[in-house]
């Protein structure tokens, strides 16, 4: 048996928790002290027996005004799934434009989550198009001011 000390992250109170754990290959929650509500106990049990995390990362964007679009999981995933999910994200390339909320990957690494875009990336205008239309560079620059 061991005692783990955590700060509950469920709400801004940030209660200091002392969690009694039965050690082993699969640690088991025994009891918690320091929580002032039931949600703290639920969180402590999950943190011991099946810790979950929401992850944020970036995906390469081809032909965009930025080379990367930020993405995140739409809900927490088990800790042991983070590396395989990050690997799938790393291997993904999107074509511009991408919009906030676009689905990037459904169920990466056999999880139930979805990877969604959290920053839009517009399509880059090609120089050829700008040069075909005299004065267009100046108009583009005026628009950006
Ligand atoms: S134990 Fe309850 S009150 Fe305390 S931080 Fe967790 S959720 Fe908030």
Image (cartoon, grey):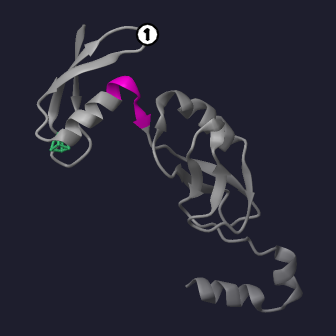
Residue 37 location, x and y as percent?
14, 41
Q: Position of residue 47 (x, y in %)?
A: 33, 29
Viewport quadrant of the C terminus:
bottom right
Instruction: Please state if 58 lies on the left or on the right of 28 as rendered.
Output: right
**Mark 1 surroundings: few (<14), some (14-19) or many (≥20) residues within 10 A:** few
Above or below for 135 versus 122: below
Q: Residue at x 17, y 25 (%)?
A: 32
Which quarter of the rendered image does ligand 1 occupy?
top left
Q: Give the residue number, with chain letter if any, for mark 1.
A: 25
Which residue is located at x 66 percent, y 66 percent? 98
Q: Is residue 95 above or below residue 30?
A: below
Residue 26 screen position, x and y as percent? 41, 14
Residue at figure coordinates x 62%, y 68% from the top left: 99
Residue 40 point in image, percent of width and height: 21, 38
- Taking depth in this image into account, of 112 and 139 the one nearest to the observer is 112
Quadrant of the rendered structure where residue 116 is?
bottom right
Q: Nearer the viewer, residue 30 or 72?
A: 30
Left or right for 78, reference 96 = left
Q: Does residue 76 sit above or below 20 in this rendering?
A: below
Q: Is residue 131 left or right of residue 54?
A: right
Q: Is residue 113 magenta?
A: no
Instruction: Locate residue 70 relative to residue 96 in the image: left or right.
Output: left
The segment highlighted magenta reads: 47-52
What secondary structure is marked by label 1? loop
Q: What quarter of the picture does the N terminus occupy?
A: top left
At 55% across and 31% down in the image, what residue appears?
Answer: 81
């Amino acid at each position: 048996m061991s005692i783990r000390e955590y700060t509950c992250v469920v709400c801004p109170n940030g209660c200091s928790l002392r969690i009694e754990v039965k050690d082993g290959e699969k640690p088991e929650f025994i009891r918690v002290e320091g929580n002032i509500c039931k949600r703290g106990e639920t969180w402590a049990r999950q943190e011991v027996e099946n810790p979950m995390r929401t992850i944020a990362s970036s995906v390469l964007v081809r032909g965009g005004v930025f080379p990367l679009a930020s993405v995140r999981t739409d809900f927490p995933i088990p800790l042991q799934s983070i590396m395989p999910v990050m690997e799938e994200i790393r291997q993904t390339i999107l074509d511009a434009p991408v919009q906030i909320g676009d689905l990037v990957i459904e169920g990466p690494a056999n999880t139930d989550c979805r990877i969604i875009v959290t920053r839009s990336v517009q399509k880059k205008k090609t120089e050829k198009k700008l040069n075909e239309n005299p004065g267009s560079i100046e108009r583009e620059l005026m628009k950006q001011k």
